[in-house]
Image (cartoon, rainbow, N blue to C red):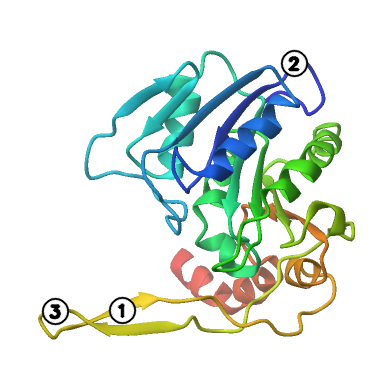
Amino acid sequence: MTEAGEGPLRILVTNDDGIHAPGLKVLESIARRLAEDVWVVAPETNQSGASHSLTLSRPLRIRRVSKRHFAVDGTPTDCVLLALQRIVEGPVTLLLSGVNQGSNLGEDVTYSGTVAAAMEATVLGVPAIAISQACRNGHPVKWRTAETHAPGILRRLWAVSWPEGVLININFPDRLAQSVRGVRVTRQGKHKVGDALVERIDPRGQPYYWIGALRREEEWPEGTDLAAIASGYISITPVHLDLTHHQSLTFLRKMFQDDTESDRH
């Protein structure tokens, strides 16, 4: 892996909203302010909520859209895997995923295809940053906010190294660019439990369900990504791929120590 800040940048841009998503065009514009060598490999269709899933039950196809622009009929994870191993000419030094239409905060990171693309790059040894723009349903997305503030943040992040197995998750608040209050480095928060389920009846009288809007706004603990966005700040969260709860290791090892010793005898 190329160390951060060393050598010319070759940036891979991807997302989970699809090859024609407006946020992808915004992110490509941001990437071109950082490097000349930019490649775009994104899903053929919207893959929001795909999480870190691979397509294993069918073959994948790559469609060349234009020079250094490709669409893959699979998930964001598929896109990154194919981009790094088949599509991009030469090693990628940085992956940018987004700009997602809607925030990826709290436990959203476990569902998010945007974050999953950054996870796959991290697994494959490429520094990765997921970028999302908070917005409200029925209101115009303030793409200009991410477009204005992201380049400076990305330059600062690229100037330093972050630990192996760590990706950076950036969320921009639902505010005009000039109204952003600043930047906060945050920990992952936790939403109110449960999503809204919307029940409807189809023309044959059978019920069907949509997973509706996310949890309503409430007070979030200080220092979390949720609190930062709610207060009008940009949130930067380092996300570690190691999901082990290390504080439980000693307790569980002690619990099963007798079983282990019995197996030896």
- Mark 3 crowdedness (10 Å alpha carbons): few <14, some 14-19, many ≥20: few
Q: What residue type is labelled 1?
A: Tyr
Between discs 3 and 2, the one toward the N terminus: 2
Image location of residue 154, percent across then percent down: 78, 38
| Residue at numbered disc 2 | 8
Q: Can residue 96 be seen in this view?
A: no
Q: Is mark 2 on a helix, strand or loop?
A: loop
Image location of residue 232, percent across then percent down: 82, 66
Q: Which of 212 and 73 is in front in this view?
A: 212
- What distance separates the C-alpha of mark 3 from that of mark 1? 14 Å
| Residue at numbered disc 1 | 209
Image location of residue 233, percent across then percent down: 83, 62
Q: Report the label total.
A: 3
**Which residue is farthest right?**
182
Q: Mark 2 near mark 1, Cβ–Cβ under 8 Å?
A: no
Q: What residue type is labelled 2?
A: Pro
Q: Can residue 87 be seen in this view?
A: yes
Of circles 3 and 2, which is in front?
3
The answer to whether residue 248 is above or below residue 144 is: below
| Residue at point 68%, 71% (across, down) | 250
Q: Is mark 3 on a helix, strand or loop?
A: loop
Between discs 3 and 1, the one toward the N terminus: 3
The answer to whether residue 8 is above or below residue 169 is: above
Residue 133 numbered tag: none
| Residue at numbered disc 3 | 203
Q: What residue type is labelled 3?
A: Pro
Q: Is residue 96 left or right of residue 48?
A: right
Q: What element carries label 1?
A: strand
